[in-house]
Image: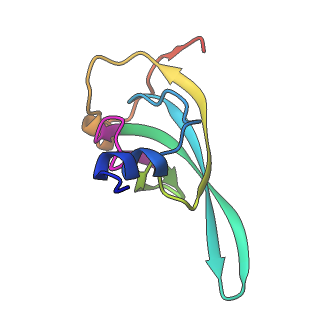
């Protein structure tokens, strides 16, 4: 019995993902392999955008400020090395893509989780 592409994609998707929206502050825990050792690295920042809907190719763009320099990372949500994603804060936003925050100095107003 052959499996279709959609069946294979659904079998590889993670089922325990939280509701991630632009404006949320998230902590993404990712396994990093250095030589023969393996450790978990945490990347904490604000979600600027989400691409790909709920499919296997869904990604989020997370931005943080590290030592006065803005750092952005794009995480595929169903990547096997991502162990956990936590939503730390939620903010009310009116845009789907928050790229204006790259040049914006103020913080977004929080909403109760």
Task: Please state the extent of the stretch shown in magenta in the rendering.
Answer: 49-64
Q: Going 49% across and 26% down the picture, which residue do you hit?
A: 19
Q: Quadrant of residue 101?
A: top left
Q: Is residue 59 visible?
A: no
Q: Is residue 39 left or right of residue 30?
A: right
Q: Residue furthest top?
A: 112
Which quadrant is home to the C terminus?
A: top right
Which quadrant is home to the N terminus?
A: bottom left
Relative to residue 48, is residue 39 depicted above or below? below
Measured as percent of width and height from the top left, residue 62 is found at 43, 46
Q: Residue furthest bottom?
A: 35
Relative to residue 31, is residue 98 depicted above or below? above
Model colouring: rainbow
Relative to residue 87, is residue 65 depicted above or below? below
Comparing 70 with 9, the one in front is 9
Q: Is residue 92 visible?
A: yes
Measured as percent of width and height from the top left, residue 109 is found at 47, 17
Q: Going 47% across and 52% down the picture, which residue do you hit?
A: 12
Q: Going 34% across and 56% down the picture, which residue do you hit?
A: 2
Measured as percent of width and height from the top left, residue 32 is found at 62, 70
Q: Find out whether residue 97 is within the magenta segment.
A: no
Q: Is residue 73 left or right of residue 5?
A: right
Q: Going 55% across and 30% down the picture, which residue do you hit?
A: 18
Comparing 4 with 104, the one in front is 4
Measured as percent of width and height from the top left, residue 72 is found at 40, 54
């Amino acid at each position: 019995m052959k499996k279709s592409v959609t069946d294979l994609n659904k079998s590889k998707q993670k089922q325990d993902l939280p509701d991630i929206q632009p404006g949320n502050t998230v902590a993404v825990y990712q396994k990093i392999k250095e030589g023969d050792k393996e450790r978990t690295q945490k990347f904490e920042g604000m979600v600027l955008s989400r691409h790909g809907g709920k499919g296997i190719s869904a990604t989020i763009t997370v931005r943080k400020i590290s030592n006065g320099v803005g750092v952005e990372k794009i995480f595929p949500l169903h990547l096997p090395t991502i162990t956990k994603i936590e939503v730390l804060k939620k903010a009310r936003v009116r845009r789907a893509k928050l790229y204006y925050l790259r040049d914006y100095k103020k913080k977004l107003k929080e909403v109760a989780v």
